[in-house]
Amino acid sequence: MAELMQNYIEDAESALLHTYNRYQVVLDRGDGVYLYDMEGKKYLDFVSGIAVFALGYNNQEYNDALKEQIDKLLHTSNYYYNVPAVEAAKKLKEVSGMDRVFFTNSGAEAVEGAIKAARKYAYLKDGKTDHEIIAMNHSFHGRTMGALSVTGNPKYREAFEPGIGNIRFADMNDFDSVLSCVNEKTCAIILETVQGEGGIYPAEQEFLQKIRELCDEKDILLILDEIQCGMGRTGYMYAWQKYGIKPDIMTTAKALGCGVPVGAFLMTEKVGQNSLKAGDHGTTYGGNPFVCAAVCKVLDLFEKNNIIENVRQISAYLEEKLDCLVAKYDFIQTRRGSGLMQGLVFDGPVAPVINAALDKGLILINAGADIIRFVPPLVIGKADVDEMISILESCLAQYQKG
């Protein structure tokens, strides 16, 4: 079997475009909070497909809902209505408090739509096309050209410049830096409520409040990217709900479909009535019956299984255990994060720890070279946290010796 797995890895390297440096494992199946490779080796998963598999693997009710929809209807295009899309939109409006929904195929596409909506909103006010968007340094919004253009890390952008243009970058949690970017052309401010790839930085309450007030004063749209930090990950369905600061436009994806590729951008009624009109935006696959059946079932299971309450309870326990590691090891500088989106900051590269953990049956991921990110399925329990800490600590001992 080991030889078979190696053959698949070699086939992948000869057939797939090499845009990822993949770990040398072929994952074959999942159950609960565990993944299994082709050899049957078991891995505790604290990555959940990068904050996607909120409900864990092989959830029977979720699987059955998708199988049922497969037998009914997969795709129609958006020239027609379909029941799952309508039901999913209603449910998503209810849990988000937003008014209008546009389903996409991914988080990056949701960001693209949010950018277009903001620019169209500004265009309808003055007929000009030179409006600017303020984004945050160290942010990550996706790999497509618009999303890349508002991603605040030059290493992702430099080979693909010029981007969409008219983007200014400010610093997260530094309101003065935002204010210095504002001018009469500013149409939107976009940020992740909790920065993910940039290092697990939650927005500060005062910072977000001041931005909201600024946007209200100048009729600038506040766009909150909740692709990674949304869908219950912080102990609220959407992280901005913890702050009590509502955006004009928000993006969501990842755990929205729990494995099925679906995202959405949502907006208030005011923006909905004064931005994108028929013909301004579209998608062939977005909002098709299959993915929307997944969204419906995910939202139903979040409520039925009290996912938000579990996140609040278990995240407190996880924070406590991670804080113990910070206190115990000098090379771990701090912990930061919100809910089940946590990061441990090391004084050097974390790749050796992540690789050692994988060998020992624990799947972890980084957020920058020196940060281990913890984004497990939202159904984990205390025993899963204990198992993770035990494996991780055995790897830290090796790190310390090295």
Image (cartoon, rainbow, N blue to C red):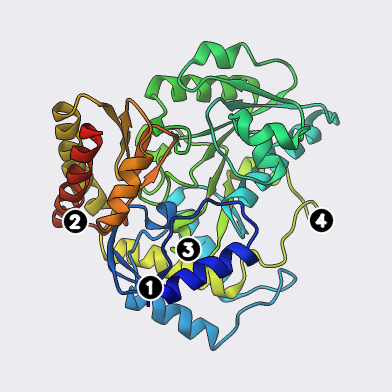
Amino acid marked by disc 4: Gly
**Which quadrant of the view contains residue 346?**
top left
| Mark 4 and mark 2: Cα distance apart in space | 49 Å
Crowdedness near tag 3: few (<14), some (14–19) or many (≥20) residues, C-alpha within 10 Å: many
Residue matched to label 4: 279
Between disc 3 and disc 2, the foreground one is: 2
Amino acid marked by disc 1: Ala
Q: 333 left or right of 153?
A: left
Between disc 4 and disc 1, the foreground one is: 1
| Mark 3 and mark 1: Cα distance apart in space | 32 Å
Amino acid marked by disc 3: Gly
Contact, mark 4 vs mark 1 (Cβ under 8 Å):
no
In the rendered image, residue 296, in percent from the top left (x then y), is placed at: 46, 68
Which badge, 4 or 1, comes first in the chain's sequence?
A: 1
Amino acid marked by disc 2: Asp
Question: SS for tag 1?
Answer: helix
Residue matched to label 3: 257
Which badge, 3 or 2, comes first in the chain's sequence?
A: 3
In the rendered image, residue 227, in percent from the top left (x then y), is placed at: 50, 47
